[in-house]
Amino acid sequence: MKTKLLHSIKSRRGMELVQVAILVALAVALGLIFKTQITDFVNRTFEGLNDF
């Protein structure tokens, strides 16, 4: 009983790690794809703050 519980907890942690890794990879991929749009947005935002 105890070993089954420990195995269940360890397998969930492994799945959480895989999910986090997938989300990080997705965020990096989206950042690379939309790099120019993100850069333009940030530049316009800071220019607006400087004008204020």
Image (cartoon, helix red, strand yellow):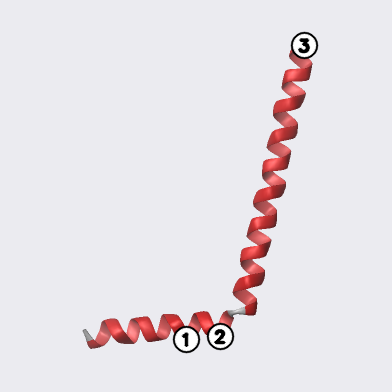
Q: Position of residue 27 (x, y in %)?
A: 61, 65
21 to the left or right of 1: left
Q: Of the two numbered discs 3 and 1 on the same chain, state the one appearing first in sequence.
A: 3
Residue 14 in the image: above or below residue 30: above
Q: Of the two numbered discs 2 and 3 on the same chain, state the one appearing first in sequence.
A: 3
**Residues packed near mark 3 inside 10 Å, few (<14), some (14 to 19) or many (20 plus):** few
3 to the left or right of 36: right
Residue type, mark 1 in image: Asp
Farthest top residue in view: 1
| Residue at image point 30% right, 85% down | 48
| Residue at image point 41% right, 85% down | 43
Secondary structure of the residue carrying numbered label 3: loop
- Name the residue tied to disc 1: 40
- Quadrant in the picture for residue 4: top right
Residue type, mark 2 in image: Thr
Residue 35 in the image: above or below residue 19: below
| C-beta proximity under 8 Å, tags 3 and 1 | no
Q: CA distance from mark 3 to mark 1?
A: 57 Å
- Name the residue tied to disc 3: 1
Residue type, mark 3 in image: Met
Q: Position of residue 52 (x, y in %)?
A: 21, 84
Q: Position of residue 14 (x, y in %)?
A: 73, 39
Secondary structure of the residue carrying numbered label 2: helix
Q: Quadrant of the N terminus?
A: top right
Secondary structure of the residue carrying numbered label 1: helix
**Residues packed near mark 1 inside 10 Å, few (<14), some (14 to 19) or many (20 plus):** few
| C-beta proximity under 8 Å, tags 2 and 1 | yes
- Name the residue tied to disc 2: 36
| Residue at image point 26% right, 85% down | 50
Q: CA distance from mark 2 to mark 3?
A: 54 Å
